[in-house]
Image (tube, rainbow, N blue to C red):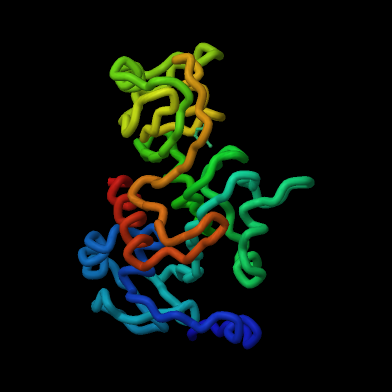
């Protein structure tokens, strides 16, 4: 029997119908490509009826069984936020405004959390989601998840700095970072650069430049993996990810599971 949402729930959110392969891939069953094969090899039932059509529309009201086992469909939420300086990447804080405080009340109720963190004075892309598995993948140091930042740095950034970033830099605590990519847009008393790193050590970029005797005076994250900050979002604004953005985060995530 299909599961019923309470009327109060359904009045808040219009029930969305999605393709079966999309729902299954978000349950971590496999990429949409893999699901085309899985659907023939296993018995997938929707409300007691075997389904072979990967585009069959389902919603949280439907009951999905895979080889007799029920897989509850939970709706996950995904937002990108352009974090302003002065806001902390946390779900609550005794004194500072948090990224969650920037959401509208109805979105706060969804219990999304930030994936990774930016320093209080760093701006830019924060992904907020309810999806713990995806967050775990994106934060995994072994998965080569690149994050891209633009920065203004006091001092002349040079080719030798590009070389140092590409070899990995020893920080003040003795830790040697993984190789990173540095591009120079402008070099002078204040230099404009882009940095790509695949770790998330505390103050990592600031510390990398400090080790080269340079000071970061402005830092903004512009992408996380294959998700780019929407240039239309002003500081403090956020929006839901598009289906295409969610899809590409998921396909890579599931393909990386092999
Ligand atoms: N590196 C930093 O130094 N700060 C950030 O917020 C992110 C990366």
Residue at the image point whose x is 31% and y is 69% from the top: 21
Relative depth, front residue between 114 and 184? 184
In the image, residue 140 above or below residue 157: below
Question: Quarter-wise, where is residue 38 in the image?
Answer: bottom left
* Residue 170: percent from left, percent from top: 45, 14
In the image, residue 191 above or below residue 245: above
* Residue 100: percent from left, percent from top: 64, 57
Relative depth, front residue between 217 and 140? 217
Q: Is residue 110 left or right of residue 222?
A: right
Tally of numbered discs:
0
Residue at the image point whose x is 36% and y is 77% from the top: 45
Can the viewer see residue 152?
yes
* Residue 205: percent from left, percent from top: 47, 28
Residue at the image point whose x is 44% and y is 27% from the top: 190
Can the viewer see residue 195?
no
* Residue 199: percent from left, percent from top: 44, 32
């Amino acid at each position: 029997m299909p599961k019923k949402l309470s009327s109060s729930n359904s009045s808040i959110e219009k029930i969305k119908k999605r393709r079966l392969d999309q729902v299954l891939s978000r349950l971590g069953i496999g990429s949409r490509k893999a699901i085309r094969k899985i659907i023939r090899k296993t018995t997938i039932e929707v409300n007691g009826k075997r389904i072979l059509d990967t585009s069959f529309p389902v919603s949280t009201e439907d009951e999905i069984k895979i080889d007799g086992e029920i897989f509850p469909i939970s709706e996950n939420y995904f937002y990108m936020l352009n974090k302003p300086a002065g806001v902390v990447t946390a779900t609550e804080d005794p004194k500072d405004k948090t990224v969650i405080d920037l959401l509208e009340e109805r979105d706060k109720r969804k219990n999304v959390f930030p994936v990774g963190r930016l320093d209080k004075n760093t701006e830019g892309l924060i992904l907020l989601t309810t999806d713990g598995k995806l967050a775990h993948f994106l934060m995994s140091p072994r998965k080569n998840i690149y994050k891209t930042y633009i920065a203004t740095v006091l001092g002349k950034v040079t080719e030798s700095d590009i070389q140092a970033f590409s070899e990995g830099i020893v920080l003040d605590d003795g830790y040697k970072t993984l190789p990173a990519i540095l591009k120079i847009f402008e070099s002078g008393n204040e230099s404009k650069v882009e940095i790509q790193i695949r770790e998330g050590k505390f103050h990592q970029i600031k510390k990398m430049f400090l080790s080269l005797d340079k000071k970061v005076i402005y830092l903004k994250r512009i992408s996380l993996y294959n998700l780019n900050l929407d240039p239309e979002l002003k500081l403090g604004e956020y929006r839901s990810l598009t289906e295409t953005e969610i899809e590409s985060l998921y396909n890579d995530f599931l393909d990386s599971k092999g």
